[in-house]
Amino acid sequence: MMHRTLSNAKTITNLIHQGQSRQAIVLFHQVLKNGFKITEFLLSAIVRACGRVAAIKEGKQFHCMAIKHGFNRDMILMTSLLDMYSKCNNITEARLVFDEMPQRDVIATNSMISGLCWSHLTLEAIELFSNMSRRDAGSWNSLISGLGHNSEGRTGLVFFEKMRLEGAEVDVMTMVSVLSICSDLAALSNGKQCHGLVIKYGFELGYLPVGNAIIDMYAKCGCMEDACLCFKNMPLKNVISWTALITGYGKQGRGLEALEAFDTMEVQGVAPNKITFLGALYACSHAGLVQEGWRVFNTMVHKYSIAPMMEHYTCMVDLLARSNCFSEAYKFIERMPVKPDTRLLTAFLSSCCTHKNLELARSVGKKLLESAPEEAGAYMLLSNFYGLVGDLQGVAKVRRLMLDRGIRKEKACTWIEINKTVHSFQSGDRSHPLSKEIYNYLQHLFKKLKSNGYVPDTSMVMQNVDEQRKEEIVLGHSEKLAIGLGLISTPPGTRIVIVKNLRMWYRFEQIIYHPLLRSPTERFHYYIDGLKHLQYVQCAENKNIKDLFTIRWNEKVDIKGAVGGLEGFHGVLTEREYEDNVWGALEFSSNACLDVNDHLFNQEYLTQNEMEEKLSSFFPKLLLQLYTFLIELYTHVDLREHIKEEEEET
C-alpha cells in the first residue's frame, strides 16, 4: 500500500513538472477514490497545478480538503493556495488566505504582491511592499514585474533604481523584468544601460531568459541590427530566442528576413511553437506576403498539428484584408471553427476602412458593435471611417449610439522621452512650457508640406468650423505635438521615438516616411530617422521583381512593392499619380537599379544643391520636391533657420 501511495505521488508530481497540470488533477481525483492518503506536500503541489490552469473550482475543493485534514496552518500549502487564488483572479479569497495565515513570511508576502499587481491593485501592492520588514530579490522582482504588467513601467524603473541603491541582490529575473519594461516603453537608453548591467553582473552568457529579453528589447526599440548581433553572439538558443528574432523582424515590416529566420530555425532542428507561428504570420501580414502567410499557416496546422488560436486567425484575416483579398478573408472567417472575436473584426474593419470598402465596412462594423457593445475603439473606428468617406449621417448615428450606451472614448495620449525626461501630450495640448515653439515649428513644417502639394485631410474633424480652423485642429494631434517637441529639442540626425496609447493618425504616417512598430501592449512606436530607415518592402501581388508592381502607402505604412531599403531600391520610377488625396501609387520597373548611399542625405558630405543635382538624374521633379522636403526634415536645419529668420523679421 505504501509503495502504491509513493508511486502515485511521484506520478502526479512528475506530471506537474512536465506542465501537464490538468492530467495531474484528473489522476489525483482518481487516486482519492481508491483511498489515497493525502499529505501537505502533495496537496500543495496539486493546488499549484490548479493555479497554472486557472482551475478555480478544483482549487476551492482542495482548499476545503486542507481545512478538513487540519493542514490550514501549513505555510507552504497556504502560500500555494494564496498563489492559486491570485492566478485565478480571485484576489478577495487570496487576501483572506493571506490575512488568516498564522505567520507571513517573505515568500507569502511576495506572492500577495504579485496577486495584487495581477488584479491591477498596484497602489495596494506598493503599500504592502513598503511595510515589509525584510525583503529579498523576489520581493523587488514581484513588484517591478507587476508594475510592468500594469503599464506602469516608469514606476517599475524607479523601484529598480531604489533596489540598486539599497544594495539588494539583483538576479536574472530582475534583469528580465526590467528589460521587458524597457521593451514596452521603447526606452532604448534605459535598455542599453540594462544591457551593460547584464554584462557587469555576468548574466550575458549562459542565461537564456536574459539573452532573449535583450533581443526582444532591441527589436522593439527599432534596433534590429543590435538584436541580430546579440542573437548571433548567444552561445545557446531556444525556441524563444528564434521567436524574439522573428517577431522583431515582423514588427519592422521586414517579412522576408522574418521568414528566412523561420526557415533557418526549422533547418537547425528547432521546432516552432504557437507563438513562433504567430510572429511569422504577423510578419507576413505587415509585409503583404499572402502566399507565404498561407504556407506558414498550413505548416502550423498540418506539419506540427498545432491548433490555431484566435490570434492566428486574426493575423490571417488581417493579411488577406490588407492585401485587398476581402472575398478570401470573408470565406476564411466563415470556415473558422470558432466565432470571430473583437480583435479579428476590428482588424477586418480597419482594412475595410483603408481600402474604402463601404458596404463591407458597414456589415463588419455592425457585427463588431453587436459583439463588443462596450468597446469604445470599435465605435471610433467606424465613426472615423464614415468621416473619411464623407458620410456625416453615419458619423452622427455612431456617436448617438455611443451616447445612448454611455460609451466614452479613451483620450489619446502620446509620450516622448528627451534627455531621460518623459513628456506627454493630449490632443490640442498647450500646457507644455515649449508649446508656442512646438506649434510655430509645426505650422512652418506644414506650410512647407502644402507648398509641395500636400493637402491636409480634415475629414475626421466633425466640428462645424471653417477649413482653416479644421487644419489647426488636425495640427494639434498629440503625436504631432510630441514629434514637434522632438524636432526642436534634439540635434540633427537624432532618432525620435514616440509612444501612443491609441492608433496613430494615419495621414501623418504618410507625411513622415518611417517604419511602424507595434508593441505587445498594443501601443505604437514610431521611429523617424530620415530616409535612412525607410522600411523594407515586399511585392504583394507579384513576387517577380522584373514585372511592374505598386508601392502603396496605407494607414499602417506597410509598404508593398519592391524588395530592398533606401540603400538599394530595385527599380526606377516610371509613373506617379494621386489617388483620393492619398500620396498615391508609385509604379516601378526593374530595368535598372538605383543605389543611393546613406551619406547622400548627410549635409556633412554634400550641400543641398549637390543632393538635388545628384537626385535629379533619377527622379522626376515632383518626387524630387518630396525628397528635398524629407532631406530638410531629416536634418531639420534649414527649416529652423527659416523660422528664426521669419521671427527676427517679425
Image (spheres, rainbow, N blue to C red):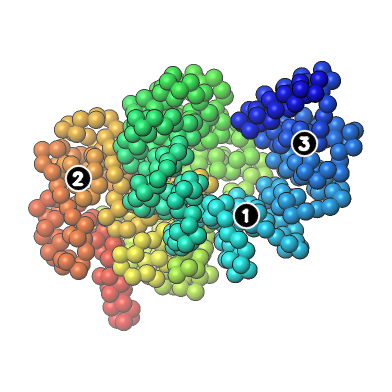
Above or below 529: residue 13:
above
Q: CA distance from mark 3 to mark 2?
A: 65 Å
List the residue tagged with mark 1: 141
Closer to the camera in the image, 505 or 287: 287
What number of labels is visible? 3
Tag in front: 2 or 1: 1
Mark nearest the camera among 3 and 2 is: 3
Q: Are marks 1 and 3 in contact (CB under 8 Å)?
A: no
Q: Residues within 10 Å of mark 3 (few under 14, many from 20)?
A: few
Which comes sooner in the sequence, label 3 or label 2? 3
Could you tell me if residue 498 is visible in this image?
yes
Location of the C terminus (image quadrant): bottom left
- Determine whether the residue tagged by mark 2 lies in a helix, strand or loop: loop
Q: CA distance from mark 1 to mark 3?
A: 26 Å
- Whichever of callouts 1 and 3 sits on the residue coming sooner in the sequence is 3
Q: Is residue 2 above or below residue 119?
A: above
* Residue farthest along the front direction in this orientation: 3
First in sequence, mark 2 or 1: give its number. Answer: 1
Question: Which label lies toward us, 1 or 3?
Answer: 3
Asked which quadrant contains residue 341, the reply is top right
Which label belongs to residue 575? Answer: none
Residue visible at 19% across and 60% down in the picture: 599
User: Residue at coordinates 51% horizontally, 21% vertically from top-left?
Assistant: 336
Q: Amino acid at mark 3?
A: Phe
Give the residue number, with chain letter if any, for mark 3. Answer: 41
Q: Which residue is mark 2?
A: 569
Mark 2 → mark 1, Cα distance in angstroms: 47 Å
Secondary structure under tag 1 reads helix
Q: Position of residue 91 (x, y in %)?
A: 76, 45
Residue 230 appears at what percent x and percent y? 38, 50
> Which three-letter amino acid code belongs to the residue tagged 2?
Phe
